[in-house]
Amino acid sequence: MIFITAVFPVKPEHADDWPELTADFTRACNAEPGCKWFFWSRSVEDPNEYVLVEAFADGDAGAAHVGSEHFRTATATLPQYLSATPRIVSQSVDQDDWSELGEMAVPGA
């Protein structure tokens, strides 16, 4: 699985609108056959920063994502709302889904 986390510094005047600005892109990514998940979270420390967590089945699915029309549209339109270039970590991991965090296991769940 290809696991990606990226941090997006959004201009303050657009930070509250970021979920709507990325909504079509997010829906299209989640609809890709090889996409396992694609979701945003807002930083609790910096309200102008969003974290994107995404995963793809394999390198072919990741390549299809980067080659998609909605990816090209996003890379052409979304930078105008950013205050800096996003930072990214992208790794192949030897698993197929989320694992449980055993150190915080909830009894009976």
Image: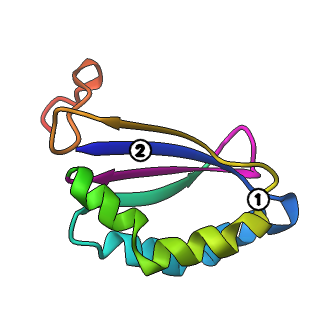
Q: Quadrant of residue 99?
A: top left
Rendered view: 7 above or below 25: above
Q: Quadrant of residue 92?
A: top left
- Judge the density around disc 2: few (<14), some (14-19), many (≥20) Cα neighbours within 10 Å: some
- Judge the density around disc 1: few (<14), some (14-19), many (≥20) Cα neighbours within 10 Å: some
Instruction: State the mark number for residue 82.
Output: 1
* Magenta stretch holds residue 44: yes
Rendered view: 65 above or below 91: below
Rendered view: 46 above or below 28: above
**The N terminus is located in which quarter?**
top left
Q: How far across and down, in percent of the image, does residue 54 sit?
A: 39, 52
Which residue is rendered at x = 17% and y = 29% of the image?
107
Q: Amino acid at mark 1?
A: Leu
Q: What's drawn in magenta, residue-wise?
A: 43-57
Which residue is rendered at x = 57% and y = 78% of the image?
73
Q: Amino acid at mark 2?
A: Ile
Q: Along the line of sight, which residue is nearer the eye, 65 or 53?
A: 65
Instruction: State the mark number for residue 4.
Output: 2
